[in-house]
Amino acid sequence: MSDLVVAHHLGPGASGLLAGHPAVAEARAIDLARRWDLPTDADVVFALHSASDPSAHRVPAPPGWPGRVRFVQLASSGRDGYPDWLGDGPVVASAAGTSAPAIAEFALTAMLMVEKRLPASAVTDGAWTPQAEVVAHPLGTLDGRTLGLLGVGEIGGRVATLARAFGMEVIAYRRSPAPVEGVALVPFADLLRRADHLVVAAPLTPDTAGLLGADAFARVKAGVHLVNVARGGIVDTTALIAALASGRVGFASLDVTDPEPLPPGHPLWTAPNVRITPHVAWSSPRTGQRIFALFADNLGRFARGERLVNQLD
């Protein structure tokens, strides 16, 4: 069974771990400086996407691709950030779901920070807030608020579970009519109109690109908190800036932007009602472990001729 040659973007230290897999005969790291100069003499490729390179999909294929490559494991849920040719021939599987717990926690943290006005509500020496002022202007709460999910796959479902534990009503808009426990599926217009916190958790596709634009922001609940933990291209950046300035969007927590990263001097850097993080919502000590475990499982499945977990059709 140990006959697979694996090439990967996991770094040299992972080669030994992969070589210990019963289906693997050899594992070798690919130089990230030449990320898409993929070998064609391997059976399996583990590919890490270029999240900040919008031109990655246009990178030319290596000569002779795919050669003997028969299986490509993606390190992320979506196909953006990878060359278009990557799936030309080999079976491709994504890592959908591996980062869902971390991203869901990040989204809940963003919502709690807005409701509790953190870090602005924290005090410094000599700046203690009188109780009477807090009574007159109380902090917010998630309890009783409405969470609107744009997309409710692995990540959206996990966000919904955590939000319900905080007493939130959860509504969602998705393409599939398949029910989700504890989530009310609603038309897009209703999602915009009702959400106090609007979390973007959909994949970037031709249908979702720019979906949150000027027309959508004109229909959102005034003062909505926008949380984007998916892809920056789902939000029209120019329209978002206008909505933030007008107050239609009260606050935006953006782990992703379009473009990514934003150029120096971009208006979002200095907007007072925006918090930007550098595409780190996925990060946790266990995310990498989950991705590696998924890949190891799929290596065994591939060697046995079985369908892969998260196989893309």
Image (cartoon, helix red, strand yellow):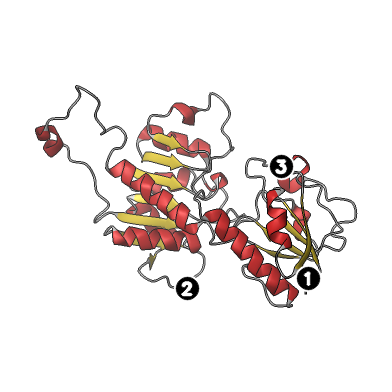
- Position of residue 75 in the picture relative to residue 154 (left or right): right
- The crowding category of the residue bearing disc 3, from other C-alpha atoms within 10 Å (few below 14, some 14 to 19, many at least 20), is few
Marked residue nearer the N-terminal end (3 or 2) = 3
- The residue where tag 3 is placed is 55
Residue indicated by mark 2: 178
What's the amino acid at mark 2? Ala
Q: CA distance from mark 3 to mark 2?
A: 34 Å
Farthest residue toward the top?
126
Q: Position of residue 17 (x, y in %)?
A: 68, 58
Foreground residue among 20 and 156: 20
Query: Where is residue 119, by image quadrant?
Result: top left
Q: Amino acid at mark 1?
A: Ser
Give the residue at x 46% y 34%: 241
Where does the image place residue 183, in percent across and percent down from the top left?
A: 37, 66
Front disc: 1 or 3: 1
* Residue 300 position by quadrant: bottom right
In this view of the protein, which residue sits in the foreground, 89 or 267?
89
Marks 1/3: CA distance?
A: 37 Å
Task: Classify mark 2: residues with Cα within 10 Å, few (<14), some (14-19) or many (20+).
Answer: few
Q: Amino acid at mark 3?
A: Ser
| Tag 2 near tag 1, CB within 8 Å | no
> Is any atom of residue 10 visible in this view?
no
Where residue 312 appears, x then y in whole percent?
A: 67, 66
Whole-angstrom CA distance, mark 2 to mark 1, is 40 Å
Residue 2's label in the rendered image is 1
